[in-house]
Image (cartoon, rainbow, N blue to C red):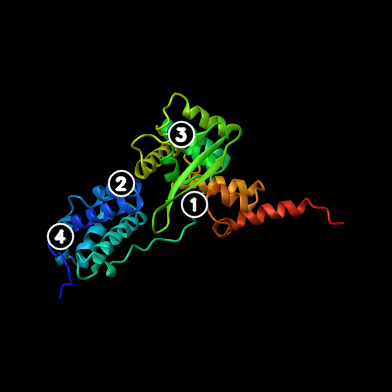
């Protein structure tokens, strides 16, 4: 039996559009636009999009989920897309647009455990930046200077840079309500000069370091292409040469920067504040660097 108010004539695509419209009201245009682009790439034109909610079953969703892999996406990416789809369907259920919840029986792909991120040495960073195109080089350099999340730098504009106070205003949407949070990153030395140069000749509303129209997918493709080129050139010179890390992503720049701060003795509280996260999260994911830095500091203290 249908739930009260159940509108079985609604298609999956229409339900997703309703979810995105609600996201726009609750969490703002940025969050809604990201979901719109995600589903435009992965759902529009697919058989699942045309299925009526009243006829939706787990097989429809599983076939679509498996198709994400067949199109060349990684299991991690497919799982992320599936989570967003389930969020949209849960909203449809709460709004009485569908009677059952068949997506609950559709599992994500199992993925192997791996380190949270890859740490790049100074030499590896220089090799990557030298081989990258100008748009990618600028974005990765900004990440290394700030340990910002890629999404924070994607929306960064010239007006977020204050050269008088030497600060960078970083914002992000976080939490169930998508509340925008801001923090101010102190710039000095080479970092300050880098961002000053990025702002030259640009209007206040222009993007400071991100290339217009670029997003997570395009950054990832650019990095993969850059790394592939590095490894091809290495093998041409020496067939036995060690490969550059092939799983590098933008988020690894944040991980690398945070690790460097800890290795060089910046206290965990300051690191957490600069990175816009908690001391608990820093301790959980970077304990080995904290332990190493503390050991070096203790070794310098004369006891007797």
Query: Mark 1 to mark 3: distance in Å?
Result: 31 Å
Q: Secondary structure at mark 3?
A: helix
Residue bearing the label numbered 4: 10
Q: Name the residue at 52% across, 38% down.
A: 168
Residue bearing the label numbered 2: 33
Q: Earlier in the sequence, mark 4 or mark 1?
A: 4
Q: Position of residue 154 (x, y in %)?
A: 41, 40
Residue bearing the label numbered 1: 117
Q: Position of residue 152 (x, y in %)?
A: 44, 44
Q: Secondary structure at mark 4?
A: loop
Residue reaching furthest to the bottom: 1
Residue bearing the label numbered 3: 159
Q: Position of residue 280 (x, y in %)?
A: 56, 60
Q: Secondary structure at mark 2?
A: helix
Query: Mark 4 to mark 1: distance in Å?
Result: 41 Å
Closer to the observer: label 2 or label 1?
2
């Amino acid at each position: 039996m249908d739930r009260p108010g159940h509108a079985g004539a609604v298609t999956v695509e229409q339900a997703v559009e309703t979810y995105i419209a609600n996201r726009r009201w609750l969490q703002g245009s940025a969050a809604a636009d990201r979901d719109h682009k995600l589903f435009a790439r992965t759902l529009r034109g697919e058989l699942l999009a045309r299925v009526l909610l009243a006829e939706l079953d787990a097989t429809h969703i599983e076939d679509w989920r498996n198709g994400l892999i067949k199109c060349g996406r990684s299991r991690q990416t497919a799982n992320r897309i599936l989570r967003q789809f389930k969020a949209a369907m849960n909203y449809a259920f709460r709004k009485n647009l569908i009677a059952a919840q068949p997506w609950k029986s559709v599992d994500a792909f199992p993925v192997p455990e791996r380190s949270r991120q890859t740490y790049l040495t100074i030499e590896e960073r220089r090799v990557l930046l030298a081989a990258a195109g100008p748009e990618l080089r600028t974005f990765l350099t900004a990440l290394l200077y700030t340990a910002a999340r890629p999404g924070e730098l994607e929306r960064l504009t010239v007006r977020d840079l204050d050269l008088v106070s030497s600060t960078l205003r970083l914002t992000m949407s976080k939490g169930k309500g998508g509340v925008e949070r801001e923090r101010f990153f102190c710039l000095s030395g080479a970092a300050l000069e880098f961002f000053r140069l990025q702002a030259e000749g640009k209007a206040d509303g222009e993007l400071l370091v991100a290339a217009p129209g670029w997003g997570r997918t395009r950054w990832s493709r650019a990095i993969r292409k850059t790394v592939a080129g590095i490894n091809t050139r290495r093998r041409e010179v020496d067939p036995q040469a060690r490969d550059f890390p092939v799983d590098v992503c933008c988020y690894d720049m944040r991980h690398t920067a945070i690790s460097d701060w800890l290795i060089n003795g910046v206290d965990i509280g300051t690191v957490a504040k600069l990175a816009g996260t908690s001391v608990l999260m820093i301790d959980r994911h970077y304990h080995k660097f904290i332990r190493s830095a503390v050991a070096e500091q203790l070794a310098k203290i004369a006891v007797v």
